[in-house]
Image (cartoon, rainbow, N blue to C red):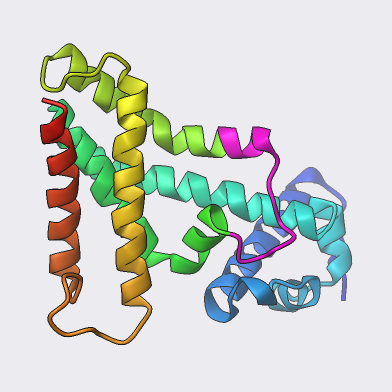
Amino acid sequence: MPRAVSTSKELGALRQDLLDAALRVLREKGALHLTLRRVADAAATSTMGIYTCFGGRAGLLEAIYEHGFHLLHEAMTRSLDGRTDPLARIMGVAYGYRQFALADPALFALMFERPVPDFDPSPEQRNDALRLCFDPLAAATSAAAEAGLIRATDPERSAYLVWTTIHGLVGIELTCSLRSPLPGWFLNSGEEGERILKDGVQALLSGLT
């Protein structure tokens, strides 16, 4: 049954409930099961509410996508807390990135892969979302260059190299974590995954010194 909304506050509450419901469906069932009916049922309302709040399925997916990057930004910010040295802040970004991906793999996949083939955020939306999480890394990399801790004629390009290293290592660990254990392999425990990430990022930073 559709939920009656007559004020902006009620509309905002319905929007949040639908977003929360969509995230539950995504995490429990997977991206391919993000249908309007499943989300509406999970929110105990009708599909009309999704059209009212998001304009349809594409708008709902865009809202999930943006929300994911805000959550990633929050995870990175928490990991940066108390770290003042630029190199330590770069590692803080890496740890926050990894923690988010391992804790919420379905959302992470929606943000960086194509689990829903017909969903492709606009270049403007992707740029804004990626910048939200890339800028803290770029700031730390620029600070490291200014302090003489790394050599970087283009600190933002160097930050992108660090970003791709983090993303690659985390992505490989995430793939391994979703499969049966592989004894004796490098990523056979959470502790080893964090160690590999640290070693990989530090190896890249050493190449920039």
Residue 6 in the image: x percent, y percent? 87, 51
Q: Which one is in front, 54 or 33?
A: 33
In which quarter of the view is residue 203 placed?
top left
Q: Which residue is pictured at 89% across the width and 64% down the height? A: 48
Instruction: Say which of 154 and 2 sits in front.
Output: 154
The chief SS type of the magenta part is loop
Residue shown at the point (32%, 30%) measured from the top left: 159
130 left or right, relative to 4: left
Question: Is residue 71 toward the left or the right of residue 29 in the image?
Answer: left
Location of the C terminus by quadrant is top left
Q: Residue furthest front?
A: 207
Q: Quadrant of residue 103?
A: bottom left
As drawn, 81 above or below 11: above
Span of residues in magenta: 114-127
Check residue 117 for magenta coloring: yes
Residue visible at 80% across and 53% down in the picture: 53
Horizontal side of 26 relative to 150 (left or right) equals: right
Whether residue 108 appears in magenta in the rendering, the answer is: no
Based on the displayed image, in which of its 4 quarters is residue 86 positioned? Answer: top left
